[in-house]
Structures are given as C-alpha cells and as structure tokens.
Amino acid sequence: MAIEHTFSIIKPDATRRNLTGAINAMIEAAGLRIIAQKRVHMTRAQAETFYAVHSARPFYGELTQQMSAEPVVVQVLAGDNAIQRYRDLMGATNPANAADGTIRKAHALSVGENSVHGSDSADNAKIEIAQFFAGNEIVG
Ligand code: CMP
C-alpha cells in the first residue's frame, strides 16, 4: 500500500495541559511518523477558513473561537493508510463514545474540546496540509 499523508492538529485543550508529548507518543506507538510539526497560534480568520465546511453548524462560532484562542500544534503524519489509521487512533469525535486506547478516550474533555483533529479524506488532507506547511517543511 502507498504511503499516505494526513494532517493533524493537537488542539488548545491538549497544548494547555502539556499533552503534546503524550499525544505524540501515542501517534508514534501506533506506527505513524511525524514528518512535519510546528506550534502556531491561529488567527480567527485562519480557523474560520480551516473549518469553513462547518460554517452553517451551530458550534462554528465556538469552535473557531476556541481554536484561535490558544496555541495548537499542527502536524503532517505519514504511513500506510495514515488517514484512516489516525482517525482510528483519535477515536470518536465525542469522547464519551471513544474506544479504549484512543487519544480522545485518554485525553479529550468534551466534543468541543476533543484534543485532536485529523483529516477525513485524501482530498481534505492535501488542502489542510497546504494551509499550514510549505513543501520544504515536510521531511519524510
Ligand atoms: P474536528 O475533528 O476538529 O472537526 C470539527 C470539530 O467540530 C470537531 O472535531 C469538534 O471539536 C467540533 N464539534 C463537532 N460537533 C460539535 C458539537 N456538537 N459541539 C461543539 N463542537 C463540535
């Protein structure tokens, strides 16, 4: 199977609680490689663009406010079937429904503060990666 790239965000609820290393350890233990990573403080406009697909949802304002209120860590992860494998590792969006062994079961606080984001398709991974990384920042 071909190596895939996926885009990950370690969200403010996790960076605030010093969980970047713990989450990275879970990512690496699952066999995914962190091939790009940086800590950024998104502007509200960046968060609104990133989550534009959710702009009609009732939680859009709260989501984009939270994501731009504090630093996040953005990443590119690589591996066979990386998009689906990272979604499996993250667990259900609502941590109340997340399986044992997942990042959200271990660390998430609520559906709004669910510690991590991962791309849901190859097309979106490409779009999301391009919003935060130049090609020469991704080193496989
Ligand atoms: P994420 O994978 O980053 O993609 C969209 C985000 O919207 C999702 O994770 C949640 O953090 C957030 N979200 C989804 N549903 C709700 C909800 N009902 N209330 C608040 N936030 C939500």
Image (cartoon, rainbow, N blue to C red):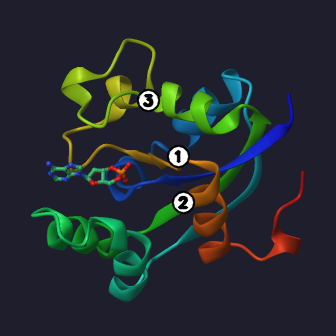
Rate crowding at label 2 as few (under 14), some (14 to 19) or many (20 or more) other CA atoms within 10 Å: some
* Label disc, if present, on residue 103 of the rendered structure: 3
Say whether disc 2 or disc 3 marks the residue closer to the N-terminus: 2
Cα–Cα gap, marks 2 and 3: 15 Å
Q: Residue at x 25, y 30 (%)?
A: 95
Tag 1 residue: 20
Q: Residue at x 50, y 25 (%)?
A: 88
Tag 2 residue: 73
In percent of width and height, residue 130 lies at: 67, 73
Quarter occupied by the N terminus:
top right
The picture quadrant where one finds residue 131 is: bottom right
Q: Residue 72 or 89: which is nearer the viewer?
A: 89
Say whether disc 1 or disc 3 marks the residue closer to the N-terminus: 1
In percent of width and height, residue 75 lies at: 64, 56
Three-letter residue code for mark 3: Ile
Would residue 22 appear left or right of 91 to someone viewing this image? right
